[in-house]
Image (cartoon, rainbow, N blue to C red):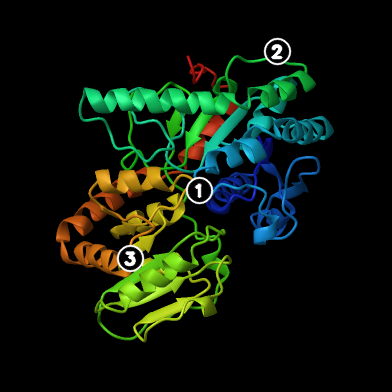
Amino acid sequence: MTHHKILLAAWDGAGCVPPLLSVARALVERGHDVRVIADPVIADAARAVGARHVSWTRAPHRTVRSRESWFIDDLGPEGFAGMRDNLAVGPAAEFAADVRAEIDRERPDVVLAETLLLGALVAAEAAGVPSVLLNTTVNMAPVEGVPPFGAGLLPARDDADRLLHEQVAAAGAAAWDVALPALNRARQQEGLEPLEHVLHQLMSPARLLVLSSAAFDFTGPLPPPIRYVGPRLDDLEGGGLTAWEPPPGDDPLVLVSLSTEFQDQTAVLNRIVEALGGVPVRGVVTTGRAVDPADVPAPPNVQVVRLAPHRQVLAHAAAVVTHAGHGTTIKALASGVPLVCIPMGRDQPDVAARVVHRGVGLRVDPSAGANDIRQAIDEVLRVPAYRDRAQQLAAAIAVETAQDLAVEEIEGLLAGDTSTLQPLVR
């Protein structure tokens, strides 16, 4: 097998890091030389999977993990604008310059990029290097008949729903185009012609690999470059943790896991813990690095820790209460465990919509009180259909992940498979 040089562009985006590094590790194990250009805080994790790490210099990045170092204001109604202006498009010229410098220093055979790093696509396009987008959640690209990403919408049931979806999609495209001047500055800097719309930059990659389950996502007729390659189920953080023991007793075990990144989630965690205190369960709450476990006082039936190996916990779990981050959600479903979703922003409303649509759990508003959360937990534990459908999804995910389709697609492209190159946006 020919070994190739691969450049992976990543950012410290909480849930997107483990699946990206999972792909990197698989490529390294196949004998490829993988460089990861990413925030300095990712350096040790990148090296741990056998990749080389180089840091962003011009582009925004984090040297420490703290609330103060988080350069994306993606909470509240202005969340999309913060993500667009501070990561995806606003600093596209800086991301492009850093990636282009790495391409020029040591030319890769392919550039892999996390979906929001449009500047990396600009650099690869300008340098004539094929690129692959790694979509680390449910599919974000427009697909006919699928609700537009970003609003947590369910599939259309009638003409009124379809009209709403069209309006939301148009508003979304217009919101992206507010930052079009920044994208075109990046393209001009790299010697490329301007685009008419920001999302047209998605025409440049050879593949868009969706690191999720087609059995879980909303799917329609896919443009050829979009490929579902199954979720990454590696427990990269949990693998290095000390042994975890389930709380004693025979009551159902409920895992609670909100974001590892700051989402102002302490109050929600406390309401969840209060809810668990009124249910005959064994609760296991992982606070992540964003919340001090001491800030979450718990009743005797609830264990609160900063981290625990989720794969091990899920083997005992009867339900999961989560913010509906894709990683936690898909790992729960891969274990056949139903969910109570409390989406707080980012991709979480869209992930929660799929949980509801597939009948594998419930969605609760983040402002809900402890009693409403308690009722949702009780229903998911009490009604067998939720677990039955979760186990059906687990069987489908097992088939999807039986082979590493992401690596196969990347290696196929490197071997010259260009037969399906079509634009993602028409």
User: Horizontal and vertical percent for residue 312?
Assistant: 41, 69
| Quadrant of image for the N terminus | top right
* Residue drawn 34% across the image and 83% down it: 301
Relative height, residue 187 to residue 106 (above, below)? above
> Could you say whether the residue bearing mark 1 is in a helix, strand or loop?
loop
- Near mark 2 (Cα within 10 A), the count class, few <14, some 14-19 or many ≥20, is few
Relative depth, front residue between 312 and 423: 423
* Residue drawn 45% across the image and 61% down it: 258
Disc 3/disc 2 C-alpha distance (Å): 52 Å
Disc 3/disc 1 C-alpha distance (Å): 19 Å
Residue type at the position of mark 2: Glu
Mark 1 lies on residue: 76
Relative depth, front residue between 148 and 424: 148
Mark 3 vs mark 2: give the one in front: 3
* Residue drawn 53% across the image and 57% down it: 263
Residue type at the position of mark 1: Gly
User: Horizontal and vertical percent for residue 403?
Assistant: 43, 44
Mark 2 lies on residue: 193
Please count the marks in the image.
3
